[in-house]
Image: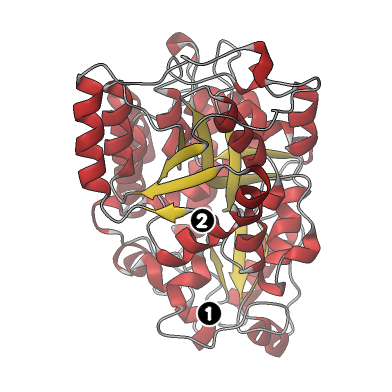
Amino acid sequence: MLRKSSIFTLLLLLSLIVAACGGGGGEAETGDDATTEGGTTEQATGENVVTIFGAYTEPGEVEAFEAGFEAFEEETGIEVNYQGASDFEVLVATRIEAGDPPDIAGFPQPGLMKRFANEAVDVTTFMELDYLQNQYNQSWLDMATTADGKMIGVWNRAIVKSLVWYSPAAFEEAGYEVPTTWDELLALTDQIVADGGSPWYAPMESGNATGWVGTDWIEDIMLRTTSLENYDRWTTPVDPDDRLLFASDEVRNAWEIMGNFLLNEQYVYGGTLTTLEDRFFDTGVPLIEGNAYMAKQGSYMPSWLAEDYPDLTIGPEGDLNYFYFPAIEEEYGEPVLVGGDIYSMYNDRPEVRQVMEYLTTAESIRPAIERGVFLSPHEDASLDWFDEANRGIAEILLEADSVRFDGSDLMPGEVGAGTFWAGVVDYISGDELGPILEDIDTSWP
């Protein structure tokens, strides 16, 4: 039975002591006998215990993740031991740098994973590229690959950010249709104003992280107005001299498009004051109460309402529903901005390889899908597994022309979790855009 350690801090201390005495994994156990023809690992041998260290600590998420391994453990005889920590980012770095990495680490940020690319195992050494391309949209594989071509992770959970939430009852009462194009979205926004309503609600208050909601707007707009190459040059430049600056025309344009919505006092419920002072957790409340019509937020948004609205329903006939944040320029297709978890391997043993292969299948998170806890990035996920609330979101993800990760999570911390957030706050507060963008560029390390 897969189990979560309840004494993780003690285990960590013990592991560091062992590491100091010469322990550690790396690529100590490799060999051709670990892989069969076609890249499928044979029945694992040895102690058959594989440790996964991740950021899941909420009981519902942990239980759902664990449930995905029950049949695998019974079939293979491998015991999968999950250890979760709320301060995962700090602890995983400590373990890897001490030479005592977990067998597998589940990163909520691919940028952090790539810090340890040298220590990670290239998954294409034991999984065929053709197989991986069948399991994932190419964009997911691109995001798992380093600049020198080393694929150091596989994706297992996804969050969709390219969504707009609304109240079906409010739309029906007002006679509004769900927009499917950018022009229709703009026209609907203006129509709601003409009818005396507030089209949008965009609360951003999040303590020291206030502003991250706006970064999602900008990133989604970037994917719809410029190339994937430019998005990557902006978020994860390979060559520092080729970085797409915040002050570039492409990035400035994305900020200005966001500003066309969020700086217009008629467009936003409560104006810029509520945008800066209202908690992001309350994003859905004015939609339910009839004070605003639309809010751009990720697939996790309904979970924020669960305590105050325990009977909340999602769907075409529900209290809330969603639609895809429309494409802007046709040449860039229908991209999706995502978050998610990517799993990297540090100890190369046959049983660890087998777990990694299993993580590339939708079956590994099927229980979580059926419980409405996770979305899947896997091409072999069946839409029949999803409940009504998530089936449409899953379809949006599976049908995406391209996928890119949340940009601020990819950038250096000084920027992505610092000046980028602060710059959004300054912009919504009315500061001039040019100096804001120049300051962010200056802060890039």
Is residue 64 visible in the rendered image? The answer is: yes
Residue 159 horizontal side relative to residue 61, left or right: right
Residue 166 horizontal side relative to residue 89, left or right: right
- Picture quadrant of residue 392: bottom right
In this rendering, is residue 10 above or below 6? above
Instruction: Inspect the image, locate mark 2, and give the three-letter code of the amino acid beneath it.
Output: Met
Give the distance between the C-alpha atoms of the residues marked 2 and 1, in whole angstroms: 43 Å
Residue at figure coordinates x 41%, y 65% from the top left = 59
Q: Secondary structure at mark 2?
A: loop
- Picture quadrant of residue 16: top left
Instruction: Inspect the image, locate mark 1, and give the three-letter code of the amino acid beneath it.
Output: Leu
Badge 2: how crowded within 10 Å, few (<14), some, or many (20+)? Answer: few
Image quadrant where one finds the C terminus: top left
In the rendered image, residue 187, in percent from the top left (x then y), is placed at: 70, 65
Residue 336 horizontal side relative to residue 283, left or right: right
Residue at figure coordinates x 80%, y 65% from the top left = 384
Badge 1: how crowded within 10 Å, few (<14), some, or many (20+)? Answer: many
Is residue 327 visible in the rendered image? The answer is: no
Asked if the residues shown at circle 2 and circle 1 are in contact, with their CB atoms under 8 angstroms apart, the answer is: no
Q: Secondary structure at mark 1?
A: helix
In the picture of the structure, the residue carrying the numbered disc 2 is 1
Residue at figure coordinates x 50%, y 22% from the top left = 244
- Please state which of residues 437 and 95 is positioned toward the viewer in this rendering: 95
